[in-house]
Image (cartoon, rainbow, N blue to C red):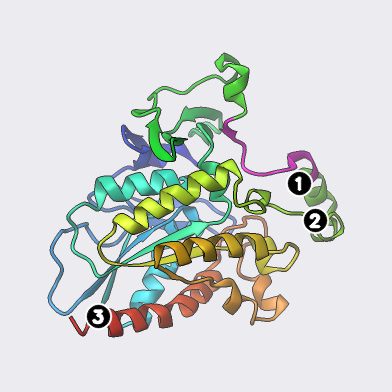
Amino acid sequence: MIQRQIFEYNDVLGYRFIPNVKVRIQHESGGYLLQTNNCGFRCKHNFLAPKKNNINRILLFGNSFTAGEGVSDSKRYSEVLENIIEELEVFNFGLPGSGTDQQYLTHQTFAKGIDHDLLIIAVLVENIRRVTSHYRYYENDQGKKLLFAKPYYELENNELVLKQRPPDKKPIEEKDLPDSEKKTIDTGGRFQFLRKLVIKTGVKEFVQKSIRYQPVPEYNNPNNPAWLIMKKILENWIIQHQKQVILMPIPLYQHIEETSDALAYQKRFKELSDATGCTLHDPLTDLLKYSPEQRRKFRFEHDIHLTPKGHEAIAASVAPVIEKILLTHIKRT
């Protein structure tokens, strides 16, 4: 559940971090430091348009796995990449709780005119549900769950049409929504009752394997309505972009720990990459090379977000791809 008190209303995205704040967030890890920049994103760099001489710059977009929920700024894969690759600057536009639709709007609104060499779109595969949601719950500083509207796209004649912009600034009572709209609330996952039950009994992984649990069945069919919207957003984003693009699907822990099959989403993203000509990097291939014991340490005990070790593994996986692009496509120009 996202804590609303570290965010402010934004008439494009629905919300963003409060700019220029530094705060310690309570967490099962013991807490972590969070600092935001001049534009209200969790990045140590202020978003300046011109680049420094001899510095390569990456624009990075994603949700809480990219923003680094649960870890301090220096432990995120964006900062780890800066340590691995010389003369690299990563502008992290990650926004917790956001969908690919809001990340696309973030790029259009906040990254316009920023000089860079490479764009990385890091798509947590669960985001396929968020692009069809119209509302999401957040938690205020009293621990109360509040429902807020978000912008979203619909497909009309195979074109994206933006809806609910600007989103309502005030929280909404679920009881006040029509029944049709109640189905568009992002509840955070499938089989909620089963999820709570198996967590309590400690047999979660066993149950998932036994029932062939598929956390993101929307990828099974290339004509699934949710996939068609996500696909169109990513197609437009990639094709309209003038620089090199890495499309990086971030797997769920079920895929990393092999309690669920990743083949369906891998097939969809491969088709998308082939159609757009972008560079597809699937870190799951590299993550599965680690031992089961190591992979379990890529997430926290209770929080499913990446630990520092998980961020290190993601960075180690994508770094060679970045270096190859910088060498072959950028340095020669």
Spatial CA distance of label 3 from label 2 is: 44 Å
Alpha carbon separation for disc pair 1 and 3: 44 Å
Q: Which mark is residue 87?
A: 3
Q: Earlier in the sequence, mark 1 or mark 3?
A: 3
**Residue 21 visible in the current orientation:** no
Residue type (three-letter) at the residue carrying disc 3: Glu
Question: Decide: marks 1, 2 in contact (CB < 8 A)?
Answer: yes
Q: Residue at x 16, y 80 (%)?
A: 54
Q: Which label sits on residue 108?
A: none
Q: Earlier in the sequence, mark 3 or mark 2?
A: 3
Which quarter of the figure has residue 167? top left
Kindly identify which residue carries mark 1: 195
Distance (Cα) linking label 1 and label 2 = 7 Å
Q: Is residue 238 left or right of residue 258?
A: left
- Magenta stretch? 184-194
Q: Can residue 168 be seen? A: yes
Identify which residue is drawn at 51% across, 35% down.
138
